[in-house]
Image (cartoon, grey):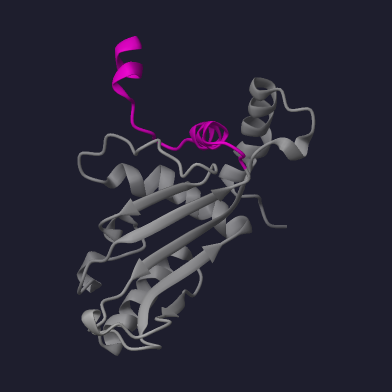
Amino acid sequence: MSTSPTLKTVYTEQVAPELTKSRGYTNKHEVPKITKIVLNTGIDADADKNQIADIQRDLGLIAGQKPVLTKSKKAISNFKLRQGQVVGCCVTLRGNAMWEFLYRLIAVALPTIRDFRGISSKLDGNGNYNLGITDFTIFPEITVENVKKTMGLDITIVTTAQTDDEGRELLRLLGMPFRRTEKAASAA
C-alpha cells in the first residue's frame, strides 16, 4: 500500500475544509485545487549534444520523470535558429509526482535561496502561478560538482481557481512563502 504525499494529505484534511469555510463553497468541486505543475527551461541555440543531454538529465533529476525536448517550429536567422533545432526542455507533473515536487519546492528548495525574503504573490489573472528560478542548483537532487553550466527554470502551477484571490489563498494555505507587502508588514 502506497502512502499519500504529505502535501496532498494537508490539502484534503486542512486546506480544502478551510477554503470551503472561508469562501462559502456549497459543492466540494468548487474548491480550487492544483491540476498540474509544468517545469520548463530553455537551451542555447549553440548548445551541443552533451550540453542538451546534461540539461535533460538535470531536469529529470529535479522532476523525477524524463523531460521532453522541445524543438523550434520555424527558422529565425537573426537568432541562428534552424527549424527542428532543440530550444528547450519541459516536464509536466500530475498526481503524486506533482504533490511531491511542490512539497520539495516549498520546504527544501525555496528556503535555500540566498537572502530569501519570499516570492511574489502576483498570479496570472486566471488563478495560475508562474515562478522563475535563475539557478536550478537550489534543488538538493543536483550536485554542484557535476554542473557545467547553470540554467534557469520556469515553474508554472496550474490551478482550477477562477480568480487570483482564490489561487493565492490556495497556495498560501499550502505553505507557499509569499513575500509580505509593506501594508501587511506595517499592520502586523
Residue at image location 25% in from the left, 85% down from the top = 77
Q: Residue furthest right?
A: 27
Q: Position of residue 109 (x, y in %)?
A: 35, 49
State left or right for residue 3 relative to residue 129. right
**Viewport quadrant of the C terminus:** top left
- In the rendered view, would you say 58 is above or below 164? below
How many numbered markers are drawn? 0
Determine if residue 188 is in view. Answer: no
- Residue extent of the magenta highlight: 161-188
Q: Give the quarter of the figure containing the N terminus.
A: bottom right
| In the foreground, 53 or 180 | 180
Q: Is residue 52 above or below residue 144?
A: below
In screen coordinates, is 174 left or right of 176?
right
Q: Is residue 52 visible?
A: yes
Locate residue 152: give its quadrant. bottom left
Task: Locate residue 77 relative to residue 36 in the image: left or right.
Answer: left
Q: Give the x, y percent position of residue 179.
A: 34, 31
Which quadrant would residue 83 be assigned to in this image? Answer: bottom left
Toward the viewer: 1 or 65? 65
Residue 90 lies in quadrant: bottom left
> Residue 53: x, y in percent?
34, 83
Q: Nearer the viewer, residue 72 or 160?
A: 72
Residue at (62, 32) in percent of width and height: 15
Q: Is residue 180 magenta?
A: yes
Image coordinates of residue 9 in percent, x first then y, are 64, 41
Report the residue that reaches farthest toward the top.
187
What type of secondary structure mainly makes up the magenta span?
A: helix
Q: Is residue 26 magenta?
A: no
